[in-house]
Image: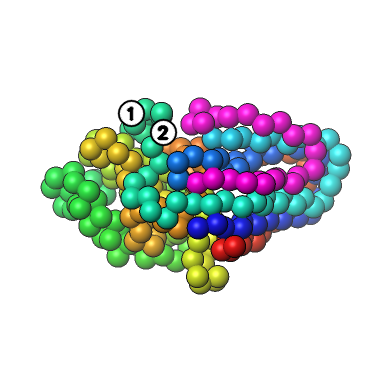
Amino acid sequence: MKLMINHQTHYQYSDWAKNSIQYIKMTPQSNRHQQVTGWQISIPGEKQYKKDAFNNIWLTSSQIESYQQMLIMAQGIVEINTTDQFGLQDSLSPAVFLQPTNATQCNDEMIAFAAYYLPQKSWANFQKLAAAILQHMPYMTASTTVTHTAIESFSAQQGVCQDHSHVLIAMAKAVGVPARYVSGYLYVNNQSHLASHAWTEVFLAGQWHVIDVSNQLFCPHAHVYVAIGRDYWDVAPVRGVRERGGVETMYSIVQVLAC
């Protein structure tokens, strides 16, 4: 399936900003699951591409000129393999994804929750756990922020795809199963769905398996991979620093269309 993706991120500042550096992870790569053609990122300033420790493409943009608005636009075409049954198989060591992070810690309640649904660490039981997480914390738009940890989101009993991913990763690691955070795009017929997305992969029986808790999807038939990490902070689409600028406001527009 061939998809056309357009992702716009708009920033507005209450004062003039300058001397900014933006770190952008919004570039998908070609692999066994997907082929990328014509991908471009438009942003002011001097740009440099490199790769991070997880082999994600990392664009750094530096700007010294003053500005009160900034537009970052990523767009291109990605053709995905809709027959894939497993997650993205790569050369990264699964052991890396057992490392603790602040966003993916478990408390006693979460450990007990995971133990109930995972008497054995099987693929079927992980799917049951994913269903239970969604029932416990239904998808609720704008119910959390990017700073929420797995413990905070689980306690709030609501969240978005980022929260579902953090909670599942935390529980998987608590029982000794490597789990990682994936950022990317999801193609759905309902265009009211936010197409910029996050999901999880768990490592079982020598394979990475997809668990999209928010949508209860367990194969990447409609998913475009952009970046992989231990949690959101490893794959954040845009992070940066600036001088001045006052109060920042931001909104995004994402379109994923079949073509």
In the rendered image, the residue lying farthest to the left is 119
In which quadrant of the rendered view does residue 43 lie? top right
Extreme residue toward the right, this view: 65
SS at mark 2? loop
Q: Residue at x 13, y 47 (%)?
A: 119
Residue 95 got which mark?
1
Q: Is residue 11 above or below residue 47?
A: below
Q: Could you tell me residue 47's position as x and y percent?
A: 74, 34
Mark 1 element type? helix
Q: Would you place residue 245 above or below residue 253 in this image?
A: above
Q: Earlier in the sequence, mark 2 or mark 1?
A: 2
Residue 53 falls left or right of residue 19 = left
Can I make out residue 204 in this image?
Answer: yes
Instruction: Decide which of 206, 240 is in the foreground and name it.
Output: 206
Coordinates of residue 1 in the picture (x, y in percent): 50, 58
Q: Which mark is residue 224?
A: none
Q: Residue at x 30, y 39 (%)?
A: 207
Q: Is residue 67 left or right of residue 20?
A: right
Q: Residues within 10 Å of mark 2 (few under 14, many from 20)?
A: few
Using a 10 Å C-alpha cutoff, classify the residue at mark 1 as few (fewer than 14 neighbours), some (14 to 19) or many (20 or more).
few
Give the camera-side residue of 250 and 131. Answer: 131
> Is 43 colored magenta in this rendering?
yes
Residue depicted at 71% across the width and 55% down the height: 10
Quarter of the image with the C terminus is bottom right
Name the kind of residue labelled 1 in the image.
Ala
Q: Which mark is residue 90?
A: 2
Magenta region: 34-55
Q: Which kind of residue does numbered mark 2 sit on?
A: Asp
Residue pictured at 41% horizontal, 28% vertical: 91
Residue 26 versus residue 8 in the image, above or below: above
Is residue 193 found left or right of 41 in the rendered image? left
Q: CA distance from mark 2 to mark 1?
A: 13 Å
